[in-house]
Amino acid sequence: MRQLSLLLAITGLLMLCTGCDSGGDDDVGLEEGTLVATIDGTSFASTVATAVRVPFGNGQEVLTLTATGQDLPPTSLQISLTGFTDDASTYSVTTDGSTATVGIPTSTGASTGYSTANAGSSGSVTIDAISDESVEGTFRFTAVSADGAAVEVTDGAFNVRLQETGL
């Protein structure tokens, strides 16, 4: 749990230090530094998106994608894939420690959290291409809040700069 907390802290710091890059187009049709999705029927486009790959014991790696939107307070989206490899592959976000979370602002300025770690969730992330510098892919999932409310995330796509850390 301590390693996971450290991973999330590093991801947050990297988000603060990394802006969107104006790289070229990719296979999913996005400029580098972009993550988009439809969250319960509403379009979401990141203002900041990062990917961090971290060794996580026993030779495994965790890939964490983090994106923040432009609304205030901002909608946030995070996907963590445990057991990540350098291969183009599809990962479930409800098994083996892999999760997807969404924080959606409420009218009071707070945020409601939804996670695929909660019962009733489903979904997957497909890594279409990966290099030493970037990762591209698509995703869709249904995440559930602590009180049982669900949010559907569809049409997700990303092309983000890949950062590595050797904790």
Image (cartoon, rainbow, N blue to C red):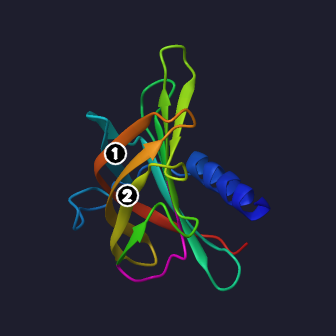
- Asked if disc 2 and disc 1 are in contact, CB closer than 8 Å, the reply is yes
Name the residue at 36% across, 51% down.
35
In this image, 114 relative to 91: left or right? right
In the rendered image, residue 9, in percent from the top left (x then y), is placed at: 69, 52
Q: 70 or 145: nearer the eye?
A: 145
**In this picture, which residue range is highlighted in magenta?**
79-88
Mark 2: few/some/many CA within 10 Å (<14, 14-19, 20+): many
- In this view, 128 is above or below 22: below
Crowding near pointer 1: few (<14 within 10 Å), some, many (20+)? Answer: many
What's the CA distance linking mark 2 and mark 1?
9 Å
Which residue is under mark 1? Answer: 153
Q: Foreground residue, 123 or 21?
A: 123
Q: Secondary structure at mark 2?
A: strand
- Please name the residue that numbered disc 2 is placed on: 123
Residue 107 is left or right of residue 15, and the answer is: left
The quadrant in which residue 3 appears is bottom right
In the displayed orientation, state which residue is furthest to the right: 2
The residue positioned 32% from the left and 65% from the top of the image is 137
Q: Nearer the viewer, residue 147 or 39?
A: 147
The amino acid type, in three-letter code, at marker 2 is Gly
